[in-house]
Image: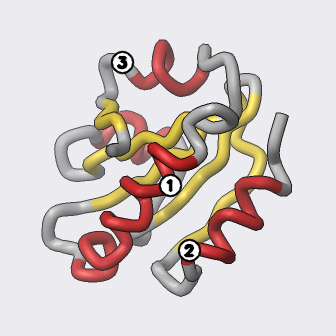
Amino acid sequence: MALHVSDSNFAAEVLEADRPVLVDFWAEWCPPCKAMAPTIDALAEELAADFKIVKLDVDSNPGITVAYNVRAMPTLIIFKDGVPVDVKVGAGQSRVQLIKWLESHAA
């Protein structure tokens, strides 16, 4: 299951991580976010050796949401060495597409 992060622990959990991090910006009211949740949670376990996968509730954490200009849900951002390196917006990716995308950013 993906770790839930917040404005208060984002720096420690994401920016200071020792491996690439996928951040899933989601909202409780977002049906596509809910549809993607099982895939994101499964990938968090499956790819744990190479990636950290976390979720950030945009409604509860406006600071980080605004800082990274997240305007649509879901938004997926890959961070490497504390820097955002790639973004996908929307729920149009399959599990296989997400794995290929993540692997293209492996450490």
> In this rendering, is residue 85 above or below 94?
above
Of residue 85 and residue 99, the one placed in the foreground of this image is 99
Q: Mark 1 and 2 residues: CB-CB less than 8 Å, in contact?
A: yes
Tell me the SS state at disc 1.
helix
Q: Is residue 9 above or below residue 86?
A: above
Q: Nearer the viewer, residue 67 or 57?
A: 57
- Name the residue carrying label 2: 95
Select label 2 or label 3 by which is in front: 2
Q: Position of residue 26 (x, y in %)?
A: 32, 59
Q: Is residue 1 above or below residue 20?
A: below
**Distance from the alpha carbon under mark 1 to that under mark 2:** 8 Å
Residue 83 appears at what percent x and percent y? 72, 32
Give the residue pinned by disc 3. 9
Snapshot quadrant of residue 50:
top right
Amino acid at dot 3: Asn
Residue at image mark 1: 43
Report whether 101 appears left or right of 87: right
Kind of residue at badge 2: Arg
